[in-house]
Image: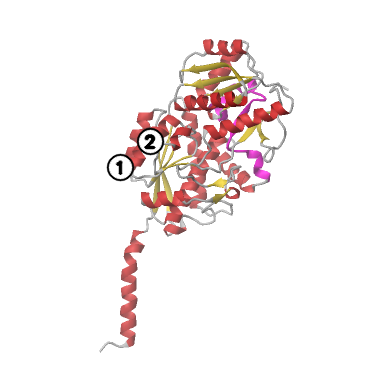
Amino acid sequence: MITRRQALIGGAATSVALQAPALLAQPREVVIGVIFPMSGPSAQIGRDARFALETALEIVNGQYDFDLPTARHAGLPGLGNAKVRLVFADHQGDPQKGRAEAERLITQERVCAIVGAYHSSVAATASVSCERYATPLVIGDSTSPNLTRRNLKFFFRTTAHDEMFSVAMFDFLDAQRAAGKQIKSIALFHEDTIFGTDSSNVQRQLAKARGYNVTADVKYRANTPSLTSEVQQLKNADPDVLLPSSYTTDAILLVRTMAELGYKPKNILAQAAGFADQAVFDAVGDKLGGMISRASFAIDMAAQRPTIGRVNDMFKARANRDLNDNTARQFMALIVLVDAINRAKSTEGAAIRDALAATDIPGAQTIMPWAGCKFDKDGQNATANPVLIQYVNKQWVTIFPAGSAVRGPIWPMNG
């Protein structure tokens, strides 16, 4: 005869036995792949991205009183406080290398998701591999609009894309024109990969729609050894505003060539990329006073969002420089991905994908000027509000839109 005490003990043992598989299934660590250019012309971008992601990792695995998802817990509470580990891969700025490295991370390193990739051309190929293996890819800094127009289910972009940025840039130009500034002509200067091509297409359309005369439309080969003839075209066109879309080495070469040929643009309004990289300002910053760039990040918003300053201090201790447009977006890409994994309570690709699709993070819980992070049906963060920043006295100042501006613009750029 089974006593009541024996029945209770037996029931408890059965309950533990039933729970055991679930407990054993909890991972001790969550492995995420990272794919950036760690060598080649954009190697500094990769090095800085590593500092940004390691800063995010420290916050995720530690416990901080920051207004960021998962920051107040050590590890991921949705997965039994599992810690996150990053596996880095170098795509060298090569789209095919990027595709191969994405596959290696998935099939050999067994990552549950990937963040990357800076170059839009690499994001385009790596995302196809991720889709094939049902592995989420979260992009923080590749801005070609077409990336989120390919009906991919496992691709998510936290940053604004170049159409969103370009609209903000032309809104700014319209505002300056309405305030009495003479802005009749623009010149487009763009490299020949997917980033420069898509950027120029959007800007060409906006210029026509808003009544700006395109006096030069200069396309050049990425990583070219010379820009002499291209800069001569810009000098001859003498536009009111130069709009460059260039990566780091090309941006440095452009500025140096302009100086050599005695061309001093009236205004530069850049599509970030190289013009958001500290390496450019270390090399030729003395020639870029007053230039304006579109941005996703405004470090001077730290007064409104104290977490920005605290995260910047952590990043600066590693990188010996402040967060910029690139590194801030890379930081947030990992935070958004980890938040989704935590809510999914799983390292299965499909579960993480569904959690990403359901993301709804308020802007105040980011380090960005965004209204928030909420993905549309194509995986694009539709609430990633762009800002414009101006390089003044060796620091960036937010100048547009009015709700985010710290001060008005210096126009023309040289005062």
User: What segment carries the magenta color?
Assistant: 274-303
Picture residue at 54% right of the left edge, 20% below the top: 189
Determine whether 407 is above or below 22 in the image.
above
Callout 2: SS = helix
Q: Secondary structure at mark 1?
A: helix
Q: How many marks?
A: 2
- Under mark 1, the amino acid is Thr
Question: Based on the displayed image, in which of its 4 quarters is residue 309 positioned?
Answer: top right
Q: Nearer the viewer, residue 27 or 368?
A: 368
Q: What's the magenta bit mostly, secondary-structure-wise?
A: helix
Which label was assigned to residue 126? Answer: 2
Of 276 and 196, the residue lying toward us: 196
Q: Is residue 25 left or right of residue 309?
A: left
Residue 198 relative to residue 388: left or right: left
The disc at residue 107 is 1
For the C terminus, give its image quadrant: top right
Q: Residue 365: horizontal and vertical position, in percent? A: 58, 50
Above-or-below relation of 126 to 261 = below
Mark 2 or 1, nearer chain start: 1
| Residue 328 picture quarter | top right
Please give the name of the residue rendered at 33% of the width and 34% of the height, measured from the top-left corner. Answer: 100
Q: Position of residue 286 (x, y in %)?
A: 64, 22
